Amino acid sequence: MALNRNHSEGGGVIVNNSESVLMTYDHIEVTFHDMEHMPDAFKGTKKGSVFMTPYRIIFVSKGKDPMQSFMMPFYLMKDCEIKQPVFGANYIKGVVKAEAGGGWEGSATFKMAFSAGGAIEFGQRMLQVASQASRGEVPNGAYGYSYMPNGGYTFPPLATNGMYSPAPPSGYPYPPPPPGEL
């Protein structure tokens, strides 16, 4: 998770060119617990909007809060659950680890309450997208470049205009050398 890296001065969200926003909800309240050393930015209830991309969740707060935004890549999240209390808003809870150089250290339990509804839909889609991302699949509705498990990105082929032949197929076109000749 990285702190204050994904918001614009006007309060909007900033995503990479290779990502698309798959789902967004407003009227979100986020709290953090179980941190060894809780920085001021994590104290109290944060109110704002949440965005889902094919690889992470981004929260952007409203107002002048020390936490303007934070992002949680799926590979740093665990134990995520959708909760439906008898009284109060439905919420998603889980544990997130700090990203190297992300502005904080350790791990934290988060609770993301959806006061205007949407926790179940968002949570189910989040679990589906996280599962697809972990297998290197492109989630439904995503566009741009697709992520590969080795950390690389594949680029969509350029459209041919009839003047140039299509690009050759990817991969090494020659058979591997026989064993022992390396």
Image: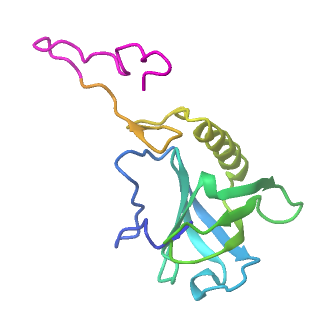
Residue 171 inside the magenta-drawn segment:
yes
The residue lying at 60 percent from left, 69 percent from top is 98
The residue lying at 30 percent from left, 25 percent from top is 157
Q: Is residue 103 visible?
A: yes
Is 169 left or right of 2, judged from the image as shown? Answer: left
Q: What is the residue that sits farthest to the front in this orientation?
A: 180
For the stretch drawn in magenta, the main secondary structure is loop
Q: Quadrant of residue 132?
A: top right
Q: Is residue 88 above or below residue 56?
A: below
Q: Position of residue 20 (x, y in %)?
A: 43, 44
* Nearest to the observer: residue 156 or residue 40: 156
* Nearest to the observer: residue 129 or residue 60: 129
Dividing the image into 4 quarters, which one contains the N terminus?
bottom right
Q: Position of residue 27 (x, y in %)?
A: 60, 64
Report the span colored magenta: 159-182
Q: Position of residue 80 (x, y in %)?
A: 75, 55
Dividing the image into 4 quarters, which one contains the C terminus?
top left
Total number of numbered labels? 0
